[in-house]
Image (cartoon, helix red, strand yellow):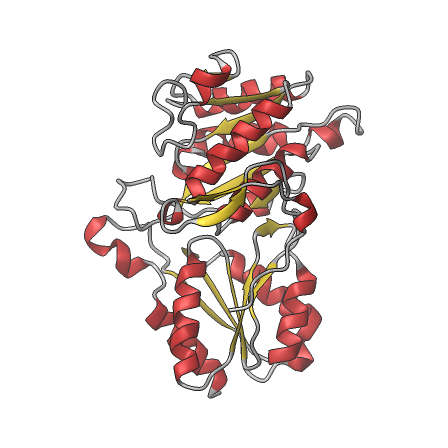
């Protein structure tokens, strides 16, 4: 697989081999060390280090005034973060699971996304909302939702979703340096799935830019988050059948990198979009529209979507049946290639 070309000038002399959750922790530690205005707020993030240990050791190192344990009140976490953000602080608000964010939705939609417009640019909301998301770790009901389109339909907020440790740290730092609010969705299933070399210092991954993970000629596979592993396995199986797959990791879900999608699809003439959210209302629909707008005359087959089903994420016994699998993705690949 082709590796992304990275700006080595951003790297420091030392690196660590980290998982995604460790890279997130290291990113927050870097921000706390380099910017006194950064704070972290969330449930059980202090002494306990968070339910996934993403904030482990941070309160001990930086104190309870900067790493703040909050009540179980998502609307309060976001509302407090708004007040901090417009008064010179840079809060990182952790929502324990994306499925817990609904009580805070009103605060995000009504205030977080609109303050720059409402004040005609006099105030911005430099805050990051971190939220683990997705199925596949056998969590109870409400814990495994993948509702990213609730926020990609909200102008004023950017949405990022890393699939690798390097991107997790780089996107988190870029999000915190952005003057506007950013939601960072972290794929729980991938938290400890793999390790990667991550610089120990401060670096950023540009928001709004996708990544070409693998070059190919026959079909473009588009995914993000935990689905990248699924797509890569399907591509390996397709290669054995003589099908060359190009793989795109969006990394940013809003604003989407239209250029990388168009360039790839215009080359291959085919596209398979993979996401674990339900089909109806899923982000795949917007990607189909982008392809139609930019690359319709280059298509050799209808665009295929491989997604979760239009049901709530099921309980443990059926959870894996809900998620896209390499076999389902391979079926989609063969469908467009042999159209």
Image coords of residue 308 (percent x, y): 38, 59
Image coords of residue 36 (percent x, y): 63, 18
* Quadrant of res 218: bottom right
Total labels: the figure holds 0
The residue furthest left is 317
Q: Taking 95 as reference, is 87 left or right?
A: right
> At 52% from the left edge and 45% from the top edge, which residue is drawn?
198
Question: Considering depth in this image, is 282 or 180 the residue closer to the camera?
Answer: 180
> At 49% from the left edge and 84% from the top edge, which residue is drawn?
337
Q: Taking 48 as reference, is 247 left or right?
A: right
- Confirm whether residue 193 shows in the render: yes
Image coords of residue 112 (percent x, y): 62, 30
Q: Taking 25 as reference, is 266 left or right?
A: right
Question: Considering depth in this image, is 310 or 272 the residue closer to the camera?
Answer: 272
Image coords of residue 32 (percent x, y): 57, 23
Question: Considering depth in this image, is 50 or 304 the residue closer to the camera?
Answer: 50
> At 55% from the left edge and 68% from the top edge, which residue is drawn?
2
- Confirm whether residue 161 shows in the render: no
Question: Considering depth in this image, is 35 or 113 the residue closer to the camera?
Answer: 35
């Amino acid at each position: 697989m082709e590796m992304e070309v990275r700006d080595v000038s951003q790297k420091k002399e030392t690196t660590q081999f980290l998982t995604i959750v460790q890279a997130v922790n290291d990113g927050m530690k870097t921000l706390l060390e380099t910017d006194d205005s950064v704070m972290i707020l969330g449930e059980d993030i202090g002494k306990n280090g968070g339910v996934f240990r993403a904030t482990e050791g941070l309160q001990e190192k930086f104190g309870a005034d900067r790493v703040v344990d909050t009540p179980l009140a998502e609307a309060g976490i976001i509302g407090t973060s708004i007040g901090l953000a417009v008064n010179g602080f840079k809060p990182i608000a952790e929502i324990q699971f994306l499925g817990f964010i609904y009580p805070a939705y009103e605060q995000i939609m009504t205030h977080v996304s609109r303050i720059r417009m409402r004040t005609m640019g006099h105030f911005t909301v430099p805050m990051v909302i971190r939220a683990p998301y997705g199925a596949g770790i056998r969590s109870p009901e409400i814990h495994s939702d993948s509702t990213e389109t609730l926020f990609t339909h909200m102008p004023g907020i950017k949405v990022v979703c890393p699939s690798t440790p390097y991107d997790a740290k780089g996107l988190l730092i870029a999000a915190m340096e952005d003057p506007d609010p950013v939601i960072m969705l972290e794929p729980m299933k991938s938290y400890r799935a793999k390790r990667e070399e991550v610089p120990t210092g401060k670096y950023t991954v540009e928001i709004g830019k996708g990544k070409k993970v693998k070059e190919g000629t026959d079909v473009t596979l588009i995914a993000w988050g935990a689905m990248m592993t699924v797509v890569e396995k399907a591509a390996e199986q397709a290669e054995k059948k003589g099908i060359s797959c190009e793989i795109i990791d969006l990394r940013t879900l809003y604003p989407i990198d239209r250029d990388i999608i168009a360039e790839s699809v215009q080359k291959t003439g085919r596209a398979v979009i993979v996401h674990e959210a339900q089909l109806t209302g899923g982000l795949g629909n917007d990607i189909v529209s982008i392809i139609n707008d930019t690359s319709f005359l280059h298509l050799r087959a209808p665009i295929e979507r491989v997604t979760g089903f239009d049901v709530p994420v099921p309980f443990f016994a059926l959870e894996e049946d809900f998620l896209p699998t390499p076999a389902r993705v391979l079926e989609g690949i063969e469908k467009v290639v042999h159209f």
